[in-house]
Image (spheres, rainbow, N blue to C red):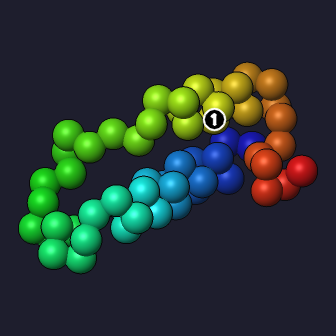
Amino acid sequence: MLLPLLTEVETQWDLYLVNTYDSKQLQTEDFESVCLPTEWFEGWLKQVQTGAPRPSDA
């Protein structure tokens, strides 16, 4: 249960960056201060706590 969720978090991070920044920014920016939306983590935490399937698994 946890490994697929961690993979989803990593995938969403990559998608978030690609959809938020242009290619030049992706090559030059420091993304240490960039955060994914808090709501996403709240949803992932609920999945872990309840053992609920990911939306793509439902």
Q: Nearer the viewer, residue 43 or 7?
A: 43
Q: Nearer the viewer, residue 34 or 5?
A: 34
**Residue 29 x/y as whole percent:** 12, 60
Q: Is residue 12 left or right of residue 23?
A: right
Residue lying farthest to the right in this orientation:
58
Quadrant of the rendered structure where residue 8 is? bottom right
Residue 44 in view, yes or no: yes
Describe the element under mark 1 as helix, strand or loop.
Answer: helix
Q: Is residue 4 left or right of residue 35?
A: right
Figure check: 22 above or below 44: below
Residue at the spot x=10%, y=67% of the render?
A: 28
Residue lying farthest to the bottom in this orientation:
23
Q: Is residue 9 left or right of residue 37?
A: right
Label 1 crowd (10 A; few <14 / some 14-19 / many >=20): some
Q: Nearer the viewer, residue 24 or 41?
A: 24
Quadrant of the rendered structure where residue 42 is? top right
**Residue 35 x/y as whole percent:** 33, 39
Figure check: 2 above or below 20: above
The three-letter code of the residue at mark 1 reads Trp
Residue at the spot x=64%, y=47% of the render?
A: 5
The residue pinned by badge 1 equals 44
Residue at the spot x=40%, y=64% of the render?
A: 19
**Residue 38 x/y as whole percent:** 47, 29
Residue 3 in view, yes or no: no
Quadrant holding the N terminus: top right
**Residue 37 x/y as whole percent:** 45, 36
